[in-house]
Every structure is written in C-alpha cells, then in structure tokens.
Image (cartoon, grey):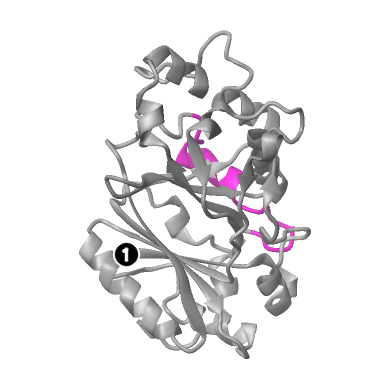
Amino acid sequence: MPTPQTGIFALGTMSHVYLEFELEAGVDGADLVALVASLREPRTTIGGVNLVAGFRPELWARVAPDAAPPGVGGFETDLVGEGGYTMPATQRDVVVWLAGSTYDAVFDVSRGVVDALAGQARLAHEMVGWPYHHDLDLTGFMDGTENPSLVEAAAVALIPAGVPGESGSVLLLQQWEHDAPAWEALPRPAQEAAIGRRKSDSVELDPRPGSSHVARTDQDLLGRIFRRNIGYGSLVRHGTIFVGFCASQAVLQKMLERMAGIDDGIRDALTVFTRPVTGAYYVVPATERLAAFGSADRV
C-alpha cells in the first residue's frame, strides 16, 4: 500500500505555515505538480520541517487520473446558508503546508518554496499558525476533543486501499476569523451553549442545544474527520485555521452544510461569532504517487 504524506500525522509541531498558490497563465499543470514534487519527497523533512503538498482536485485529476479520488471537486462556489450566511469559495491550485518546531526554520523553508515555484505559480494566500495553550483554540475551549487517536487517524483520513487515490486524503482548508469582543462578552454558560461542551473539561452538555457546534458537527452522524486545527493572527484579527483531513469529501461538505443550516434551517451557533474568510479543498496524494512526478531537490 502506498505511503501517506507523513506530515499529516506529525503532531506536536509548534510553527505552521500554509502557502496557497495559483497557477501562472500558460503554465502546464503537470509541470507545476512536478515542480512541487521536486521540492522534496514528502516522506522526509527539510531541515526538521515537515512538508505536505496538495492540489486542486481538478488539477490533480487532469495530471494523475489514475490516482484521483472519484467525485472530489474544488470549493468553486460560495456556500450560502440560513439567513444568507456565506462560506466563501477561495479555491487555489496548490497548497504547501510546512510545520516545524521553530518559526525561523519554517520561515526559511517557506521562502525557498516561494522562490522555487516562481514563474510557475504565484503565492495567493499565506497563513501562519501556532498552537494556543497546547490544545485550546482562541475561543478558550479545547479543540479536537473528538479527534481520533493516531492509531485510528489513518483509517479516518486516508483513502482506502483499492480505491483510486489510495493513501491520499481530501483536505478542507479554511481560515475562520473570530469576533473576539462579542464572544468574550458572553457569560460562560452562553459560550458553553454555543459550543455544546463545558469550558472547564470539554465534557459534552446533556442535553446539548440543537444549534450548538457539537450538535451541528456531530461526527457520529456525519462521519469522522482528522483535524489539525491551529490558531493564527494578530491581537486585532485572529482566529482558527481549520485543517480537516478525510477519506471522503462528502463528510466534510455535509459538515459545512449543517454549520450553515442548509439542511434544516438550524445554523451553528458558533458561526455568530466566527466567520470563514477562505475555503478550499485539496487532494493530498500519497508520497510515492507525488514523488513519481519529481526530480532533483530544489530547496
């Protein structure tokens, strides 16, 4: 069975950068994939920095049709839900996720990646992330309570054997900006009702409010995902980078639709206090399939 890009499961890294690129006019997609693959075979790290690469689903299907998971498409149109609440589509062609123990090393590799892709793809969006108090997000609640353990994560995140794209994954990448003053003005019981968990120990409320984030994203109902969420931002503008891996795009898409209230008109209460500013899907191919496009290292 092919090997997944190991950075997907490399927990404990303290500095993260997400670089999203758009193909330059006239550039052949296969040439760009080859260039990304040649940055470094993702089975290894670059100076202690993990590199994970993903591609617009349509781009990957065009250059590697035998390794393209069926039915997976880009985030091409805004998702509009209850009351006009909108999750914007900002699909790009390539994402390179770099993660390491120190930001200086991640920064240096990031510059090298941008330089290596110059002329083939332009940097369209950059997000710098960092963990907040180990396992909290910037709402002050624990993030990833329902995340599978590393023992279980591969079965959740990776396309199974025998299916095109096996050992790859579908990535949903979004930047969510928090309305920190409005959120922090809420008393704790109101915050807990919006999340659906106690703030002190992350235990689920019983009963949980139907509009709570826990209820709207119930993985027992929707299916499991493996999240690598991380905090980002400045004192004035900050929030959460949602990094969700799954073997099935349908699970990720249904999660977004339920958060927006598309299925039954009940919007996720957390969306009153946080809004997505980006949204894209990427296919993250198996190491060997991506490495087949590569040549000599260029970083």
For label 1, the residue is 49
In the rendered view, tell whether residue 38 sits above or below residue 12: below
Where is residue 127 drawn, in percent x and y?
39, 59
In the rendered view, tell whether residue 31 sits above or below residue 257: below
Q: Examine the residues drawn in magenta and state their main secondary structure.
A: loop
Where is residue 137 drawn, in percent x and y?
37, 36
Q: Nearer the viewer, residue 158 or 228?
A: 228
Residue drawn at 34 percent across, 29 percent down: 140
Residue 57 position by quadrant: bottom right
Residue drawn at 68 percent across, 35 percent down: 83
Where is residue 236 drawn, in percent x and y?
30, 45
Q: Can residue 80 be found in the magenta stretch?
A: no
Mark 1 neighbour density, 10 Å: few (under 14) some (14–19) many (20 or more): many
**Taking 166 as reference, is 43 left or right?**
left
**Taking 248 as reference, is 101 left or right?**
left
Residue drawn at 35 percent across, 33 percent down: 136
Task: Give, as a three-letter code, the residue at label 1.
Answer: Val
**Taking 156 as reference, is 66 left or right?**
right
Q: Can residue 164 be found in the magenta stretch?
A: yes
Q: Nearer the viewer, residue 182 or 171?
A: 182
SS assignment at label 1: strand
The furthest residue to the top: 206
Asked whether residue 158 appears in the rendered view, the answer is: yes
Where is residue 191 drawn, in percent x and y?
44, 20
Residue 49 position by quadrant: bottom left
Asked whether residue 203 appears in the rendered view, the answer is: no
Q: Which residues are magenta?
A: 146-166
Residue 111 position by quadrant: bottom left
Residue drawn at 43 percent across, 58 percent down: 7
In the rendered view, tell whether residue 265 sits above or below residue 256: above
Q: Quadrant of the N terminus?
A: bottom right
Count of picture labels: 1
